[in-house]
């Protein structure tokens, strides 16, 4: 779809296919994924006093007007009030414009999407036959990236396609037939299109993997490797991740060429979060304990994590029946339902969002005060990712984890 048109993801379309990343139209592949076994986490790791550290003031070396980019991009940035780049943008864009592979270590909310969108859109506008693939772990993040690409490139007549589960397949096939320069999607749905033959990647010379650590944690490593192997061997690659562990390093070493690493992480995500546990004697008292928590403190905006789609739906309905302003988000909902739930939470129509881990990845809501782990996470890294949704923009956040005695 042209980048001066409305994104298809906001339109209603028939033929919904549910599930976070992989659709049900490919009969040769299973849509289900068995959940991972939980690691044992010492409960003492869920207890920590917040010790916020003051971020050092950053002086940008550039303004957006300094970059050698198309005047249309500069105009669109100025119209949105973008004058001075964030640190990740300031350090990434100059190198990216020269064609370097980039490893960006940065959290959500640092402006990393524009850090790769601006140089990539410049390449697309300067080289008419170039194409870029952006891979994101979740539908919500893919949609956020798509929206940002669209406003930065507004009026350019570039064409795009967004390939995610839970949305009608018809618009995706139509947009792919239009030979889009920009394709954004989740690994499972991209892989499905590759298997159908509706997407070929041999002429894609630019690729972005956003939140690559989460993508690998979610079990997409084989899909991601297969996708990267099908791209043009002469390409520019961008890898953005909050962490740089052995799995991420192995992927980068295999599929990048002389990358430059840019890191703007200043400390642990959990430093601004006061963490504690809620001890219960048996499961029968768990719901009442949660009820007391929700009515007893200054819990202005809360995300509650539970294990399964069914348990999330059941807990949300129970809270609503008790008079709480709540909604649920999980992979069993259609994309339209998930978008409505997220919009209601962002706009304070509901104060409590009950979520599964997978559905919550990619959600960027700045003013969450509390994270409640109604069920323990599968791993400590999942725990850090969960609680990192509170305590943003220098504010103190709170995390509570239910533990059986």
Image (spheres, rainbow, N blue to C red):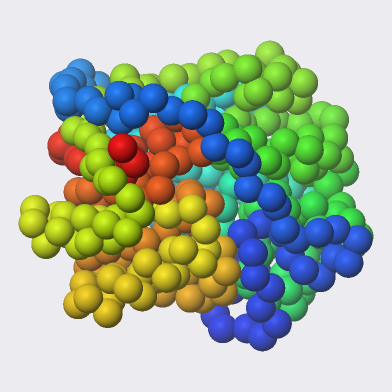
| Residue 318 figure quarter | bottom left
Q: Residue at x 20, y 40 (%)?
A: 397
Position of residue 188 relative to residue 222, above or below, is below
Residue 263 rendering spot, x and y as whole percentages: 44, 20
Q: Position of residue 71 (x, y in %)?
A: 47, 48
- Please give the name of the residue rendered at 54% of the width and 21% of the height, measured from the top-left corner: 244
| Residue 331 pos. (x, y %) | 56, 63
* Most foreground residue, 46 or 385: 46
Observer-nearest of 273 and 111? 273
Mark yes or no: residue 109 visible: no
Q: Is residue 94 above or below residue 160?
A: above
Quadrant containing the N terminus is: bottom right
Question: What residue is at 91 percent from the left and 61 percent from the top?
Answer: 28
Please tell me which residue lies in front, 267 or 27: 27
Question: At 85% across and 65% down in the image, what residue appears?
Answer: 26
**Visible residue check, residue 398:** yes
Q: How many marks?
A: 0
User: Can you say whether 198 is above or below 188 in the image?
Assistant: below
Which quarter of the rendering shows the C terminus?
top left
In the foreground, 328 or 242? 328
Vertical comparison of 229 with 316: above or below: above
Q: Left of 250 or right of it: where is 107?
A: left
Percent across and percent down for residue 403 are: 33, 40
């Amino acid at each position: 779809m042209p980048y001066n048109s409305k994104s298809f993801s906001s339109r209603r379309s028939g033929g919904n296919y549910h599930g976070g990343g992989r659709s049900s139209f490919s009969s040769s592949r299973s849509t289900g994924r068995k959940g991972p076994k939980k690691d044992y986490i010492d409960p003492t790791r869920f207890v920590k006093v917040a010790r916020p550290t003051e971020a050092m003031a950053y002086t940008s070396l550039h303004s957006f007007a300094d970059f050698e980019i198309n005047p249309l991009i500069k105009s669109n940035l100025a119209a949105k009030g973008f004058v001075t780049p964030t640190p990740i943008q300031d350090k990434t864009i100059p190198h990216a414009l020269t064609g370097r592979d980039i490893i960006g270590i940065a959290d959500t909310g640092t402006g990393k999407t524009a850090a790769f969108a601006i140089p990539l859109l410049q390449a697309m506008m300067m080289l008419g036959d170039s194409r870029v693939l952006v891979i994101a772990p979740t539908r919500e993040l893919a949609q956020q990236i798509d929206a940002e690409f669209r406003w930065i490139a507004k009026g350019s007549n570039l064409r795009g396609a967004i390939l995610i589960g839970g949305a009608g397949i018809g618009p995706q096939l139509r947009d792919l037939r239009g030979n889009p320069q920009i394709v954004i999607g989740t690994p499972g749905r991209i892989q499905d299109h590759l298997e159908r033959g509706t997407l070929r990647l041999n002429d894609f010379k630019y690729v972005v993997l956003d939140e690559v650590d989460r993508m690998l944690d979610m079990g997409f490593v084989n899909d991601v490797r297969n996708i990267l192997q099908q791209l043009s061997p002469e390409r520019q690659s961008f890898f953005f991740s909050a962490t740089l562990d052995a799995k991420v390093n192995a992927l980068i070493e295999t599929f990048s060429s002389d990358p430059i690493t840019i890191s703007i992480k200043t400390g642990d995500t959990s430093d601004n979060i006061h963490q504690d546990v809620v001890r219960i004697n048996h499961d029968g008292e768990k719901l009442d304990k949660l009820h007391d928590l929700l009515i007893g403190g200054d819990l202005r905006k809360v995300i509650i994590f539970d294990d399964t789609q069914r348990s999330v739906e059941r807990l949300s309905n129970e809270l609503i029946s008790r008079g709480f302003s709540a909604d649920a988000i999980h992979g069993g909902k259609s994309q339209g339902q998930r978008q409505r739930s997220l919009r209601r939470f962002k706009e304070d129509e509901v104060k409590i969002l009950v979520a599964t881990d997978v559905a919550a990845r990619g959600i960027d809501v700045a003013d969450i005060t509390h994270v409640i782990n109604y069920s323990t996470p599968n791993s400590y890294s999942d725990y850090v990712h969960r609680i990192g949704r509170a305590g943003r923009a220098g504010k103190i956040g709170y995390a509570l984890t239910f533990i059986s005695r």
